[in-house]
Image (spheres, rainbow, N blue to C red):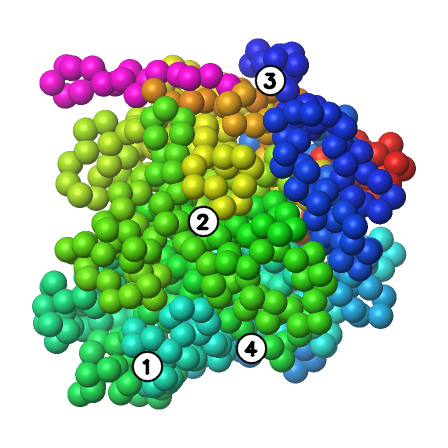
Amino acid sequence: MNEHEDDNTSTSPTLMEVVEARLSRRGVLRVGMGTAGAAVLAGIAGCGGGGDDAVAAPAPAPVARPLALSFTPVAKSTADVVSVPAGYTATVIYALGDPLTSDAPAFANDGSDTNYENRAGDHHDGMEYYGLNAAGARDVAGSDRGVLAMNHEALTDQFLHVAGVTANPRPPAEADKEMPAHGLSFVELRKTGGRFATVKDSIFNRRVTPLTPMRVNGPARGHALMTTKFSTAGTDCRGTINNCGTGSTPWGTFLSGEENWAGYFFRNATDNATRGGSTAGSVVSLNRFGSTQGAASRHGWETAGTEDRFARWDISRKGTSTDGTDDYRNELNTFGWIIEADPYNATQAIRKRTALGRFAHESAAFGLRAVGKPLAVYMGDDSRGEYIYKYVSTANWDAADANPANRITTGDKYLDSGRLHVARFNADGSGQWIELTTANAAIAGYTSYRFADQADVLVNARLAADAVGATRMDRPEWCAVHPVTGEVYYTLTNNSNRKVEPSGASQMAVDASNPRAYTDAPPAATAPGNINGHIVRMRETGGESAATAFTWDIYLFGAEAGMDAARVNLSSLTGDHDFSSPDGLVFSARTGLAFIQTDDGAYTDVTNCMMLVGMPGQVGDGAVQSLEYTKADGSKLTVQTRVGAKPTLATLRRFLVGPAGCEITGLAETPDGKAIFVNIQHPGESIAKANVGDPAKYQSHWPGNAGYGAGGALARPRSATIVITRDDGGLIGVDGDAVLNAL
Ligand code: FEO
Ligand code: CA
Ligand code: CA
């Protein structure tokens, strides 16, 4: 039922309705009306104003109103296909194993393939697009040619091998396939005859793997916590792993977040004692980041041989040195960072940006920038009860840096020195950014872990955030900044440890910003907690990147449409836009639309994972709502939360549903807003080793069943990038031809 379909949006206007923005011929956004958004918009205008065209901001300014979602909502589905609205076409362009160079033969997709250093990796995740002109130079408006940069988060490992995974000790040949199937891809795309395709052997094509040498930059460079057998000076490290969300810098580089890295490493069963016992600093740190002694590692690569590329995954203290230069006891400290790579120049060493803190990183989203003001980078830590972070650069933004001669050293300028903050959400709708610094008495005096210095605070950001009493959130996944309002949106994907009456340190009580704990409707009857997740948004005080206070509300609560509107379906979602477990989140720089992607396990009896398109308003456009809980002893608990304006079919629609077993993640667009790239991650990931040889037992055959690559209707499933375009050549999601003419 669609009782909200005809809601009058004038009672809860979207900001694009409130603000009448116009684009000048120079692409600079001007503000036509004084509103709450004017101060922020003035910042945008200042960024481009006065500069020449060469230093125009990389992201084109949002188009003017009026815009309205103009596609038919896609129905929920469990079919093994990608569904998009009528009038749109989705095409696979880059799937697991696709060759980047002529050195790699066509992908057989039967487990026999090798040489992933020259093929697409597995589990495509966050993604960014970098425009090129016809001559192959950086062009922020390049919509016919570009470099697609993406993460390869993890593996559906059974399908990488002919007969599935061999148990420990792992055969070296299997480990040598699995490692390089992680990391990053850079792949050139060109549009010919209106269709995008990858370019084999392009100079921009590049794989980065867990073995690629990188630099440690920022405050932890050369620190005692970073010394390893590989880099006794603590200045260098190897590789990146479990890369999830992404970011794009104003100077044209790619940011990638290292997420669930701890589980790839092994510590022997007596490692805690060898390090000095359970209260020793390194043991407290390892445990806080999820590295438990004696626990099996994710892929057992440390068992594949004594060669260094295998041995480094065993991070037990084994050497006799006191500084860790003769083993890999500190290796874990070289993971958990935001890394920066230049997509246009493979010769520039990738940097681990330690100033941004170490945790289970998702995306890194820049706040709106203004000349002469610091840059803000928003980040989340994806585990149950982890925190929301903001980095503020020491350097103030210089518009000339939008098109610098050297991009990676421009990154050194803005991302190697700054202040890291963590968020505390208050029940009254306010919040604070608390700086993580040794100058904070709670950090300096923390008794659970003694911080040696500021670099230690950054390496152990989770512990520092614990010390200052940050708010434990329902698994912060991606964040994104609205290109007009500058408000910051975070997906909180779900949290099975959120309880009305928590028990034990791992559980947490419902609170204003994480207010739900409930039981799913049948048939998934036993999943208490915040099952479906929500999306919180924050507005910086004064619109300032360096603000230390903010206001917040909940943009959307995920829920099944049929669930209790008083306690669960607080956003009154209907069948055309109900969803569960929001994860990927990206705003279009062209249209300001929000792309919301799901990685769900709760609503999958009804639908595969999906992507919605939203047109959000702003913080405070909804109402305060009280949730009533009854405790075990019969007493009542009331939690007051702040629910954003309820979506209507005019402001939120389901745009895509993916094939069986996948999650939808990663989104990049061409600067003209006419093509979007989306990743279909791990279709058919549910596969037992015993069934690898029996295609009838596969959960998915996509994209082989859609005619892509070898195998056809019986193919092994593959993670893949699709490109989506509109058959009439228009903007994605909205009818904007008149606007385009105005450009
Ligand atoms: Fe890689 Fe938090 O999802
Ligand atoms: Ca994710
Ligand atoms: Ca995920």
Please determine whether, in this image, residue 649 is positioned above or below residue 726.
above
C-alpha distance separating marks 4 and 1? 19 Å
Residue drawn where x is 62% and y is 52% of the image: 372
Please say if the residues under marks 4 and 2 sit with CB atoms less than 8 Å apart.
no
Q: Earlier in the sequence, mark 3 or mark 1?
A: 3
Q: Amino acid at mark 3?
A: Ser
Secondary structure of the residue carrying tag 4 is loop
Residue drawn where x is 67% and y is 62% of the image: 401
Residue stretch in magenta:
622-639
Mark 2, residue position: 390
C-alpha distance separating marks 3 and 1? 56 Å
Mark 2 neighbour density, 10 Å: few (under 14) some (14–19) many (20 or more): many
Residue 349, label in figure: 4
Residue drawn where x is 40% and y is 26% of the image: 429
Viewer-nearest residue: 709 or 695: 709
Mark 4 neighbour density, 10 Å: few (under 14) some (14–19) many (20 or more): some
Mark 1 neighbour density, 10 Å: few (under 14) some (14–19) many (20 or more): many
Q: Does the magenta portion include 637?
A: yes
Please determine whether, in this image, residue 119 is positioned above or below residue 418.
below
- On screen, residue 337 versus residue 201, left or right, reads left
Mark 1, residue position: 228
| Quadrant of the image occupied by residue 119 | bottom right
Q: Earlier in the sequence, mark 3 or mark 2?
A: 3
Q: Earlier in the sequence, mark 4 or mark 1?
A: 1
